[in-house]
Image (tube, helix red, strand yellow):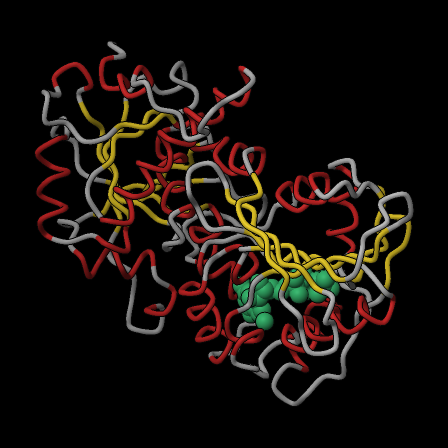
Amino acid sequence: MTDAPFSLTDLPFSAVPGAMTADEARDGALLFRVARALAETRLGVPVLVRGANPALEPTAVAMVPAESISDAALAALAALGTGEPVRVVLTGRRAAVLGLIGPDQPPLAVAVTLATAPDRARIARLADPCLDLEGPLPALASVEPLPADSAAGAAVLLAKLARLLPAAVICPVAWDRLGDGRPLAVEGADVAEYQLAAARSLRQVGEARVPLAGAEDTRILAFRPADGGTEHVAIVVGTLDPSRPVLARLHSECFTGDLLGSLRCDCGDQLRGAIEAIAAQGSGVLLYLAQEGRGIGLVNKLRAYQLQDQGFDTLDANGQLGFDDDERIYLPAARILSQLGITQVRLLTNNPLKVEALSRHGVDVVERVPHIYAPNPHNRRYLETKARRGGHLF
Ligand SMILES: Nc1nc2c(ncn2[C@@H]2O[C@H](COP(=O)(O)OP(=O)(O)OP(=O)(O)O)[C@@H](O)[C@H]2O)c(=O)[nH]1
Ligand SMILES: [Zn+2]
């Protein structure tokens, strides 16, 4: 095998300008490589992916996200491939809800081969639970569970990071025979490290005084990952005293609840309530984290809502889509708190996972401050599910 398709690593680019330590430079180069692969993935053009463990699977695959598959994309994959049939890679959770594997401890990825020629409709039927009521599954020739560090596992992770349905169409490629016009290539190990590297690279990029109703002494600071991805925002009320525990709220973005006042969740109340509570306290911080839909993105959250209207609860709807119950990580929040000089917090939350995750990342959570708002007829079941199955403390 040659490393030639990975020559991007040699380019004199780094996503972190004006670096820095060797670690920062390494993260910057990794972010650069994966961000380009994510852009191609969103465009629906084939990307070459090599498994994080080449010993396990010495081939690379070409992948197109299932969501954007077309006849042209299938033809492009076939042209790149070794002649083996294309396969559809689902997460283990999606494969389990389809009954393709048992429900216990699903693997991260499952590759399926269709018994008939794959086409857009058959692939969509496998990948998109919103079509689950539209008739039987296509006939399958094989179902193969695969570890996360396989190329197939990295392909499905790429689709997930691109905020698409977590499913990919892949075919093995003859690495050495790909010519100059080959697609962009990415290492599975880089894809696996991407979110953590992005969190480590967060830098403050803007700051302004923004008086809020009820919290006039407020500043907003933005933090950008080095690949130019979506910014997280810190809303700092009053003057922080980092020598004492700071009243803090980690708020995950919710376009529908925060901006539109959706009654399906409690986010709008929690957002405004947190700012009110912090202002009443005199000072504190709310991190507005770019983690829409518990990390699955707005489009997938809308799909999850459609599934909830069919009777699934909020956690099972995530599972039907092939996601974990909660896809968020809290290293970005911990890194921003650290850059604000905050080491100790009193955390406004009902979610013990947030307390545990922040503590693991070195932030001392000296107190959990309950953050409960009255339910309404539309969000009652959602809140009950969070308490009964999600471990939320109400
Ligand atoms: N996937 C999914 N996300 C949802 C749903 N309803 C709300 N969300 C998202 O859930 C997130 C709200 O989480 P938070 O309020 O930060 O946190 P939490 O886990 O409820 O914990 P608290 O700190 O107690 O509020 C937002 O990103 C919402 O967009 C849903 O039904 N499905
Ligand atoms: Zn919400």
State whether residue 56 is above or below residue 366.
above
Give the residue drawn at x 74%, y 57%: 285
Foreground residue among 375 and 77: 375
Q: Using residue 382 as the reference point, say whether residue 195 is left or right of it.
A: left
In the rendered image, the residue lying farthest to the bottom is 377
Foreground residue among 31 and 228: 228
Q: Using residue 54 as the reference point, say whether residue 139 is left or right of it.
A: left
Please provide percent x and percent y for residue 379. Answer: 64, 81
In the rendered image, the residue lying farthest to the top is 2
Please provide percent x and percent y for residue 49. Answer: 31, 29
Q: Can see residue 77?
A: yes
State whether residue 113 is above or below residue 352.
above
Give the residue drawn at x 18%, y 57%: 120
Give the residue drawn at x 14%, y 54%: 70
Q: In what quadrant does ligand 1 lie?
A: bottom right
Q: Can see residue 316?
A: no
Foreground residue among 47 and 101: 47
Quadrant housing residue 367: bottom right
The image shows a total of numbered marks equal to 0
State whether residue 56 is above or below residue 390.
above
Rendered-image quadrant of the C terminus: bottom right
Rendered-image quadrant of the N terminus: top left
Give the residue drawn at x 82%, y 61%: 283
Please provide percent x and percent y for residue 134. Answer: 29, 73
Please provide percent x and percent y for residue 306. Answer: 44, 75
